Amino acid sequence: MKIKMQLLIAAMGTLVPIMAFSANPSVAPFGYFGIEGSYYDIQKGKNPDGDVHNFWQPAVHLGWRINHKFSLQAQYGYGETEMRHFDEDIKDHQALLGGRLHSVYDLFWDFYPYAGLGYQYHQMKPDNFKKSQTDAGFGEIGLQRMLGKHLMLDVGYRHIITLDKDRFADRQPYMAVNLLFGQKKPKQIVEVEEPIILPEPKCKDVPAGARLDADGCPVMLTQEMYITLHMEFEFNKTTVLEEYYPDIGEIAEKMVEYPDSTLLLEGHTDNIGLDSYNQDLSRSRAEAVMQVLVTEFGIDPSRIRTTGMGASQPIADNSTEEGRAQNRRVEATISGKKDVIEMLK
């Protein structure tokens, strides 16, 4: 009994200062009551007279989560087994006290790992033999997961080493369900926004809702633009169909809106005819679209570049009339950027 008390005092004397020093007062503590089921795997001893079979052991425990990192747990368990070499029933009583270090990071599926150390006391009562008492220390690892607001799952493994001269090493996998109590609502921190004092503006005619820099001037952003247009042509012709004039007009509007933008016109043909002829035909189609932009919409020709690709880049099957019609085309690609005022959201 004296040895058990010394071990208990030593364990408490080691764990309590550590947990008190590491406690975080901003984390609300809580208690829990649990029911555990475990399988006690007992190592065989040198003297076979004292060996007993492995057994299932139910237990109840009471724990206290001091903060988000540390907890204490006391447990009582009871199991029944029998000797390996005698027809003798055994009643096993177990008392346990341990401390756990918890991780604030989950591994998977919201399972949070922990590791623990503690002291375990066993008393085995045979029906016709002298009762046996054992002091042991244990280490454990496990995972915890919340199943609801007040319910927690606990799965783990204990490795138990007896403190007597024989030094048995027993194993105890376990699973427990815990009911939480005494939880406190975390304090709500209300953030009060301080008024923003704007400096005296150095810029005039600032639009309403504009984001301002430290000098009171609008913050400028570079806005990029990229548009592609597809126009088809009749067989062996370079005439731009009137149905595409509204689309060409939209390109002209964007080129006016973005003064630094440029336009690339690529002409294409189907595969009917000689390659050299198709090359000239495709370039002529691109130049026909450029002519519409210059004469109808007043776009500077120096901002437009034309090229002929012939039949080298089909986008459809040239073996069908529908596919060849799609390949007789001009692709217009406009790109540019401009500085705009950033507005507050």
Image (cartoon, grey):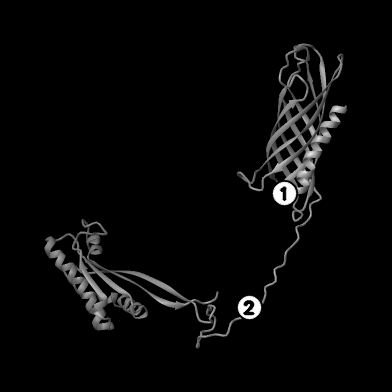
Gap between marks 2 and 1 measured at Cα: 37 Å
Q: Which residue is mark 1?
A: 68
Q: Note whether residue 109 is visible.
A: yes
Res 187 → quadrant: bottom right
Res 55 → quadrant: top right
Q: Specify whether 207 is left or right of 231.
A: right
Q: Residue 197 location in percent, x, y?
A: 63, 80
Q: Which residue is mark 2?
A: 196
Residue at image position (70%, 68%) is: 191
Residue at image position (73%, 22%) is: 168
Secondary structure state at the residue bearing disc 2: loop
Per the rendering, the mark at residue 157 is none
Q: Note whether residue 66 is visible.
A: no
Amino acid at pointer 1: His
How many numbered badges does the structure rendering display?
2
The N terminus, quarter of image? top right
Amino acid at pointer 2: Ile
Residue at image position (69%, 44%) is: 102
Secondary structure state at the residue bearing disc 1: loop
Res 195 → quadrant: bottom right
Q: Residue 292 location in percent, x, y?
A: 24, 79
Q: Specify whether 169 is left or right of 133.
A: left
Q: Are marks 2 and 1 in contact (CB under 8 Å)?
A: no
Label 2 crowd bin: few (<14), some (14–19), many (20+), radius 10 Å: few
Label 1 crowd bin: few (<14), some (14–19), many (20+), radius 10 Å: some
The C terminus, quarter of image? bottom right
Residue at image position (72%, 67%) is: 190
Which mark is first along the chain, 1 or 2? 1
